Amino acid sequence: MKREFKYIKAFDQSTLTYRYHKGNKITLVFIHGGMVNNRCWSYQYDYFKHKGYSVISLDLRGHGQSKGKRRADSLHNHAKDIEQILQNEKISNCILVGHSFGTLVSLTYYKDYPKRVQALVLLAGTIIPDYPILKQVKRLFQVYSRVKKAKKKQQQLERNNNDHH
């Protein structure tokens, strides 16, 4: 299986490495966990590529073929790196798929560029206590739960109203 990599310079001149296939559906961005690289997404990359999706799998800075320091406290730098790749490929919105440390990178990217993210898929997430984005996600779930309950109550009232007419 031939892997074609692309290389670009990040905002701090680190070299970023990624794979990109342009399909006719929304772009899925696969973000790996710590101590691995984009190859951990090879099966998913190929599967969704053949289903017509645009697909990106990247090496986070300091991982795989990307250069730069591995630092867990530089989540915003990772988010900037993803933004650089999306701008380079002229991608306006995407679905982020993060695993382990990649979930924190995904959440940080969403916090920094919310209008660019159509959905988040978070697998085996890592938690940093009191990380601000986690509070936002918790609030989103609370709002969703209230909306779901209100919708269910409204449907029940409508059914009761229809039964009386």
Image (cartoon, helix red, strand yellow):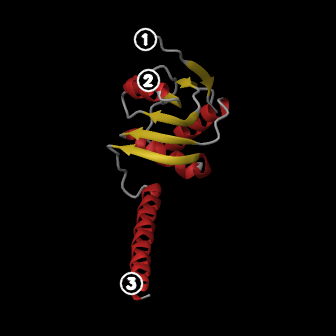
Viewed as shown, does residue 127 lie left or right of 60?
Answer: left
**What is the three-letter code of the residue carrying label 2?**
Asp
Q: Residue at the location (60% across, 46% down)?
A: 116
**Location of mark 2 (residue):** 46
In the foreground, 71 or 23? 23
Q: Residue at the location (59% across, 26% down)?
A: 22
In the foreground, 18 or 54? 54
Q: Are marks 1 and 3 in contact (CB under 8 Å)?
A: no
Measured from the top left, where is residue 129 in percent x and y? 36, 55
Measured from the top left, where is residue 98 in percent x and y? 42, 40
Q: Residue at the location (55% across, 35% down)?
A: 27
Q: Which of marks 1 and 3 is nearer the N terminus?
A: 1
Q: Which of marks 3 and 2 is nearer the N terminus?
A: 2
**Location of mark 1 (residue):** 1
In the foreground, 71 or 9? 9
Q: Which of marks 2 and 1 is nearer the N terminus?
A: 1
Can residue 17 be seen in this snapshot?
Answer: no
**Location of mark 3 (residue):** 163
Label 3 element class: helix
Q: Do the residues labelled 2 and 1 touch (CB within 8 Å)?
A: yes
Label 1 element class: loop
Viewed as shown, does residue 82 lie left or right of 132?
Answer: right
For marks 3 and 2, give the one nearer the viewer.
3
Cα distance, mark 2 to mark 1? 10 Å
Label 1: few (<14), some or many (≥20) within 10 Å? few
Cα distance, mark 3 to mark 2? 52 Å
